Amino acid sequence: MPNTQKHRGANPKDAKLFAENNLPKLKKALIDLSYLVGRDYSPKASLKLIGDRYRFSDRQRQALSHSACGENQLKNRIKKHISKENLKGQNIVIDGYNQLITLEAALSKAPIFIGIDGCCRDIASVHSTYRKVEETITALELFGQELKDLGLKKILWVFDKPVSNSGNLKQFIEEISEKNGWNWEVILEYNPDKYVAEKEDWVAVSTDSWVLERAEKWFNLNGYIIEKHIENPWIVDFREN
């Protein structure tokens, strides 16, 4: 059956799953999950334990899994985060799908979750195949505008080579970049997380926890763009009030 997805939007059940009256329970569960993960308990087993205890759905569990962060992890991420004022003249390496899909989801009014570390994440279901949606061009234009204004030296996008249509997306982004005069390079890698995390002397742009733990320094680009440009995004803030 052909894929007819036009937006990276919300699931019909999300309005109920992430309603305001569910937030206190979700936040409490996230504290419990972060405590376990921060003490090196298995993330998978910890998520099952917490999810079963609170009787959460799969999508609620996904949101919690993406948003959890142990105390030492949080300190490490805060220490390595670069402010936008200190980005001028820097080289940045962007975790392509990680960033693009989240911004597409935010533009589509899907729920965006702010985790304990302050990063914006989505729970859009994109796995072995990527397909552009109506918000793809707008997302790339927002990236283009802000990356240009930040005064960066080099900008490198890294996408998953095994994901179907990555080659087509690479060509599409290169064409848009050339048309707009953006100094972007786009590459495909079999293990983009490892590539982004281990790129020495470059600022990593990702919200993947594995990357954030290993990168020398990083910048919360999506959080910056969503706050600055997207009107009335659906934000589910899991941080304590």
Image (cartoon, grey):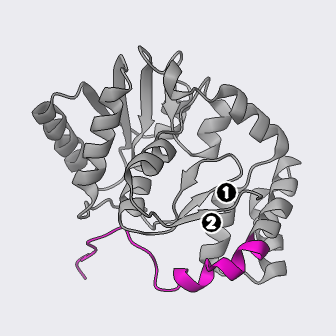
Q: Is residue 101 above or below residue 140?
A: below
| Mark 2–mark 1 CB contact (< 8 Å) | yes
Mark 2 secondary-structure assignment: helix
Tag 1, which secondary structure? helix
* Image quadrant assignment for residue 30: bottom right
Question: What is the crowding at mark 1: few (fewer than 14 residues within 10 Å), some, or many (at least 20)?
Answer: many
Q: Which residue is mark 1?
A: 67
Q: Is residue 8 magenta?
A: yes
Q: Which of these two is toward me, 22 or 207?
A: 22
Residue drawn at x 55%, y 25% as measured from the top left: 198
Q: Position of residue 238 (x, y in %)?
A: 69, 61
Q: Nearer the viewer, residue 197 or 238?
A: 238
Asked whether residue 225 appears in the rendered view, the answer is yes
Marker disc for residue 63: 2
Residue 161 on the magenta segment: no
Q: Is residue 43 above or below residue 193?
A: below
Residue 10, by quadrant, is bottom left
The total of numbered circles placed on residues is: 2
Q: Is residue 23 above or below residue 43?
A: below
Question: Residue 227: percent from the left, percent from the top?
Answer: 47, 49
Classify residue 79 as left or right of residue 33. left
Q: Residues within 10 Å of mark 2 (few under 14, many from 20)?
A: many
- The residue drawn where x is 44% and y is 55% is 102
What x and y, as percent, mark residue 4? 24, 77
Part of the protein shown in magenta: 1-26
Q: Is residue 98 in view? A: no
Q: Quadrant of the C terminus?
A: bottom right
- Residue for point 86% across, 63% down: 32
Identify whether 59 is placed above or below 141: below
**CA distance separating discs 2 and 1:** 6 Å
Residue 106 locus on image (x, y percent): 42, 60
Kind of residue at disc 1: Ser
